[in-house]
Amino acid sequence: MNEQSEFQQPLHPISLGTRALQGAIIAFVLIATFLFFVGEPDPAWAKFWFIRPLVIVPVAGAAGGAFYYYMDTLRYQGGWKTALANVASLAVYLIGLWLGTVLGLAGTMWD
């Protein structure tokens, strides 16, 4: 009775840290690509102005990845709940990424 069936799937097949890391890596690649094409920065900006967005945006991406992880409970219920979990995860990730970008670029490119 206490043996697990080989057909049972774990609720979280991938750990929270892995999901957060995936979200952070995606966000880092996006902001780094954006910053790569900036060109000549304004001389009024600090010398290392690009460090703030390269830190803040991946943190926002990691939060989005964590939200995706916590939506697994709803995702495994199937049907429309899976679609709702996926749409909510994407919306939270994109909104968090946008807010992280605004916060990271405030005072420099977002002025």
Image (spheres, grey):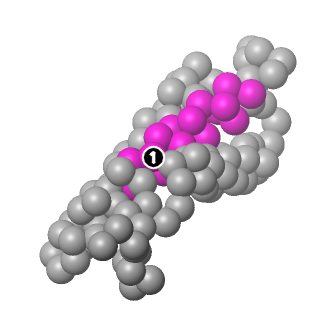
**Stretch in magenta:** 51-68
Residue drawn at 16 percent across, 75 percent down: 80
What predominant SS class does the magenta segment belong to?
A: helix
Residue drawn at 57 percent across, 35 percent down: 59
The question of residue 84 being in magenta is answered with no
Q: Is residue 102 above or below residue 12?
A: above
Q: Residue 48: image x %, image y %?
A: 81, 22
Q: Which residue in the rendered view is the most extreme toward the left?
A: 80
Compared across the picture, whether 93 is left or right of 101 comes to: left
The image quarter containing residue 51 is top right
Q: Which of 108 and 84 is in front in this view?
A: 84
The image quarter containing residue 19 is bottom right
The question of residue 62 being in magenta is answered with yes
Secondary element under disc 1, as helix, strand or loop, is helix
Q: Which of 45 and 104 is in front in this view?
A: 104
Q: Is residue 12 above or below residue 28?
A: below
Residue drawn at 73 percent across, 18 percent down: 45
Task: Locate the N terminus and report the quarter of the image it occupies.
Answer: bottom left
Q: Residue 105: image x %, image y %?
A: 59, 30
Residue drawn at 67 percent across, 47 percent down: 28
Residue 109 at least partly seen: no
Q: Nearer the viewer, residue 33 or 97?
A: 97
Q: How many labels does the image show?
A: 1
Task: Please rate how many residues cluster around mark 1, counting C-alpha atoms within 10 Å: few if below 14, some from 14 to 19, many from 20.
Answer: many
Q: Which of 8 and 15 is in front in this view?
A: 8
Residue 24 at least partly seen: yes
Q: Mark 1 is on which residue type?
A: Ala
Q: Mark 1 points at which residue?
A: 66
Q: Residue 66: image x %, image y %?
A: 45, 46
